[in-house]
Every structure is written in C-alpha cells, then in structure tokens.
Image (cartoon, helix red, strand yellow):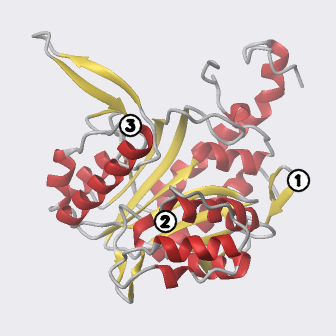
Amino acid sequence: MPHATTPWWDKDAHRDRRPFLSARGQITRAVRRWFEDQGFTEVEAAALQVSPGNEAHLHAFSTEAIGPDGRRAAMHLHTSPEFAAKKLLAAGETKIFDLARVWRNRERGPLHHPEFTLLEWYRTDAPYETLMEDCARLLALAAETVSARVLTWRGAEADPFAEPERVSVAETYERFAGIDLLATVGEGGATDREALAAAAAGAGIRVAADDTWADIFSRVMVEKVEPNLGFGRPAILCEYPTAEAALARPKPADPRVAERFELYACGVELANAFGELTDPVEQRRRFIAEMDEKARVYGERYPLDEDFLAALAHMPAASGAALGFDRLVMLASGAQRIEQVIWTPVAEV
C-alpha cells in the first residue's frame, strides 16, 4: 500500500483502492433496486438547511446564503437529511429513501470522514421493529452483492446472514459493566446523575466532577458496551433511555426508554433508527435542551428549524433509519479505512 502521504489520485494508490470503489458501485445499485422493489421512492434532500441538526455533539459546516438583494443569512450543510425527509412525510410521501451526501465537522479517522453518505429511509405506519428487519436484509444484500461470506473489520468478523442479536441498552450495561442503568432513570425519563456516577465508578469508569449523566452514559457505552457488540453475528442495541433519544418516541410499555436502536457489526456502529417523535412541543423542548448542552460544552448553538417543527404536527406515525453507507461497503468489501471506499476523499487539514 502506498505511503500515507501519497495523494489519492496517484495511479498506484488508485489501483489499490479500485476494488473497494467497484464494490461501492455494485452495492449502491443493489440497494437502490431493493428499495424500489419494496415500493420506496428515492428522494434527494437539499444539503443547505436552516439548521444542520440539533444534537449537542454534532458539528456542522456553516456558510452564508446571499440573496439577489444582498441580504445575508446563515446556512448549514446538513448532518443528516432527516428534517427534509420528515417534511416530505408531512407532504404525503409514505415510503422514501435517500442516499444522501452529508457533512460533519470535527470528524476524521478510520471510520469517520467530514463528507460521507447516509442511507436514510422512512416507513409511515410501520413499527420500528420493521426497520430492524430492513437492516438485517441490507447486511445480507451487501454481502451477497460482492460475494462476501462474512463482514470484516480489523480482524473481527460477523455473519451477515445470521439473525442479529437483539439486546436492550439496559441489558448490555448489566452484562458488560455490572450497572443497573434503569435504576438511574425516573418514570418520566428524568435522569439521576449521582446514581449513575456511583455505579460507573464502581465499575472502574473514570468520572469527572463536572460530568453530566449523559457524559457518564456515553463513557460507559464507549468503554464497556460498544467493544462487545456485533462479533460473530450483528447486534441490534435497542431501548435507549429517553434522554438519549432526542428524536424518538417513548415506548408505550416503559416511557423510561425510547423506540431507538443502533445496528452493530464487528464492533462498528452501522445504523441508528427511531420510532419517530411527532409531538412538536416535546420535540422543541428536547432540541432546546440539546442546544443548551451544546452551548455549555462548545460555546455555540444551532438554530431550530421552525419549518420542520411546523411540519412535524402534520407528519403521520412513522419509523426511520440512517445507515452509514460507506461503513457498510467497508465491512462487505474488507476495506480498513473509510477513504478506501470514497471516490475523492476530502483534503486533510
């Protein structure tokens, strides 16, 4: 493999990447056919948005729109097509998908790139468990398309044809960290920071004095839970605490947790899915809380998309998922770095 400083357009470097890029094209075509056969309509969300998304730890690329009269307005490259897609559901679309180019700042590594592709899809009047079935089928489809027996990354393997393990977040915290997570979550979804801090410290997790409940939750997830998911067969991690599911509706049977799941294979997070929240008042409350946290940690906040919140009141019950398409190609093709499956990687800074 050429030295890391060799430009991606070097003929030898490109020759090495070409099989992975070919796999990308094959999987792209297969995925499009599968969704079309399922009765989905492919849509294309505008990349420039009023708000790039309102999650505290997502960072956008920002710019200005200048009108014909010279008036300037802040705009952002979206971190997901979610807001635009849900407006389409409000408009009457029922089954849609988007192979969306998206942008996230402050992200670069073997599995992260500033510009990447999210495969995002929505089903109206469908339970979020249906999306679990979609995810399992997409894993098998990607592997079938490039004749891969297993998904692989950094020596780990997962069988793409095996039924994914379904496990709740609370179960993984008990199994891998010895923590009773739901003992730190109230009936209305409120969280008990001190209780989780004590439990995490008892499990050998470092806890700082200014850590919030969410900070501790994330650290346990990264250090104890995620390294154990998706080995041998894929895993679906479901029933996140409501505080960690800003865009998902609470589960009717237990409002402490939400209809959110993530898909893992070979220890890699591949997809994030929700039974979608459609209450604009509650959504506004959650967005404000997320932006307050962003301001506390990073000293900045993004605007709310008022048009999105207005559309939410007209959106039917739906479930939606976002799958990291580049990562799926990596695991099916055996690539080790995300740049190997991106035709023209973004310049390093």
**Observer-nearest residue: 215 or 35?**
215
Residue at left 44%, top 79%? 185
**Sequence-wise, which precedes: disc 3 or disc 1?**
1
**Farthest front residue in view:** 209
83 in relation to 181, above or below: above
Instruction: Give the image quarter of residue 301.
Output: top left
Q: Residue 70, how many percent across, how many down?
A: 14, 10
- Amino acid found under the numbered disc labelled 1: Gly
Q: Residue 267, how many percent across, how many down?
A: 73, 59
Left or right? Give the position of 69 relative to 327: left
The residues tagged by marks 3 and 1 sit, at their Cα atoms, a distance apart of 40 Å
Give SS at disc 3.
Answer: loop
Location of mark 3 (residue): 299
Left or right? Give the position of 342 relative to 153: left
Location of mark 2 (residue): 213
- Amino acid found under the numbered disc labelled 2: Trp
